[in-house]
Image (cartoon, rainbow, N blue to C red):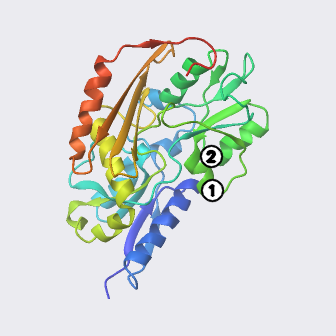
């Protein structure tokens, strides 16, 4: 019998939950092999005050975790895919993903019929993501944006204490934790999320690509969609460091619709692009969407509730 898979993750509640899902998938795909887990604090875990864009590095939630794999103490690192930089140090790569959860953002707090128009003047919205800040500034300039750090539960506690009127968070994290957070889901075709948002990724040495194929096959649709999203962003940042997003969605006919968007950080304008990939297209075709985006005209903000 082969030795157990050695999995490493961060110790946050969400990361632990994601690791549990990854471990369950590994046990199903490799019956009898077993899984062992270790936990490592990341730079982003240790510094809970500085905004992401001021931390000066990419991969603030993954470098220390991936080092466990690079130095041979673990086989697989479990991550939120949106936190991974577009390039990983050799010989690491994304070996597999799990079926994607909700891909979009959730406006937690007031439930309003038209999402943005219903937010009162001066509504305090908590988010540290550059993309989400620009999104709020574009759609709801009447709001005040406040930085917020900490895990999902900590942020919700701050909301309950009245430090914020609303939070903008990834819906998948809240759903995975089973938290009773009421709010309004944002349409990912318009409020385009970060590449890979809602997806759990397993990172490891390229030598494991062949055995991990059986896990990839169980999430084949998600795997192709995230390849398209990341191909589009191959030369750009990811996660919380850029005011842009990419969302790929597979249609019933097998074609993939790719939506990309960019906002000016001050929320004064945005531009968007939509590309359709045929079932046989290589994911690298998605780079054309970013070329189109760079040529697209900027749409100025038209006021409250801009679509």
**Tag 2's secondary structure?**
helix
Q: Residue at x 38, y 70 (%)?
A: 6
Report whether 194 appears left or right of 170: left
Most extreme residue toward the bottom is 1
Which label belongs to residue 152? 2
Asked if 160 appears above or below 273 in the picture, the reply is below
What is the spatial separation of the Cα atoms under label 2 and label 1, in whole angstroms? 9 Å
The quarter of the rendered structure image containing the N terminus is bottom left
Residue 237 is situated, as x and y percent measured from the top left of the image, at 34, 33
Residue, far front: 253
Residue at 40% across, 85% down: 32
Mark 1, residue position: 177
Pick whichever of labels 2 and 1 is earlier in the sequence.
Answer: 2
Front residue of 241/44: it is: 241
**Quadrant position of residue 206:** bottom left
Binning the other alpha carbons within 10 Å of mark 1 as few (below 14), some (14 to 19) or many (20 upward) gives some
Q: Position of residue 94 (x, y in %)?
A: 31, 55
Q: 10 Å neighbourhood of mark 2: few (<14), some, or many (≥20)? A: some
Question: Which residue is nearer to you in this view: 232 or 209?
Answer: 232
Q: Do the residues labelled 2 and 1 touch (CB within 8 Å)?
A: yes
Residue 86 can be seen, yes or no = no
Q: Position of residue 224 (x, y in %)?
A: 32, 52
Q: Residue 235 carries which label?
A: none
Q: In what element is the residue under mark 1? A: helix
Looking at the image, residue 112 sits to the left or right of residue 81; the answer is: right
**Mark 2 against mark 1, which lies toward the viewer?**
1
- Residue farthest along the right direction in this orientation: 161
Taking the spot 40% from the left edge, 48% from the top edge, the residue there is 251
The reply to whether residue 119 is in sight is: yes
């Amino acid at each position: 019998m082969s030795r157990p898979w050695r999995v490493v993750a961060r110790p946050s509640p969400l990361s632990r939950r994601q690791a549990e899902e990854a471990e369950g998938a590994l046990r199903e795909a490799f019956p009898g092999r077993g899984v062992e887990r270790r936990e490592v604090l990341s730079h982003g875990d240790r510094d809970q005050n500085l905004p992401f864009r001021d931390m000066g590095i990419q991969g603030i939630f993954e470098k220390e975790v991936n080092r466990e794999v690079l130095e041979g103490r673990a086989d697989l690192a479990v991550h939120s895919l949106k936190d991974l930089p577009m390039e990983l140090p050799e010989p690491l790569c994304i070996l597999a993903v799990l079926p994607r959860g909700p891909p979009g953002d959730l406006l937690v707090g007031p439930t309003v019929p038209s999402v943005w128009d219903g937010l009162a003047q001066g509504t305090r919205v908590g988010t540290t993501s550059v993309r989400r800040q620009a999104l709020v500034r574009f759609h709801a300039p009447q709001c005040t944006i406040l930085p917020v750090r900490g895990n999902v539960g900590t942020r919700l506690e701050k909301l309950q204490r009245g430090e914020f009127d609303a939070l903008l968070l990834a819906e998948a994290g809240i759903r995975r934790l089973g938290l009773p957070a009421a709010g309004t889901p944002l349409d990912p075709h318009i409020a385009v999320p970060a590449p890979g948002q809602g997806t759990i990724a397993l990172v490891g040495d390229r030598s494991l690509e062949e055995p991990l194929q059986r896990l990839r096959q169980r999430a084949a649709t998600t795997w192709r969609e995230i390849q398209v999203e990341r191909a589009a962003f191959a030369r750009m940042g990811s996660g919380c460091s850029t005011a842009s997003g990419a969302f790929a969605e597979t249609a019933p006919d097998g074609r993939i619709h790719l939506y990309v968007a960019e906002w000016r950080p001050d929320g004064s304008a945005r531009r968007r692009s939509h590309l359709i990939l045929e079932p046989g297209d290589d994911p690298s075709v998605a780079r054309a969407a970013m070329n189109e985006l760079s040529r697209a005209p900027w749409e100025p903000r038209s006021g409250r509730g801009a679509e």
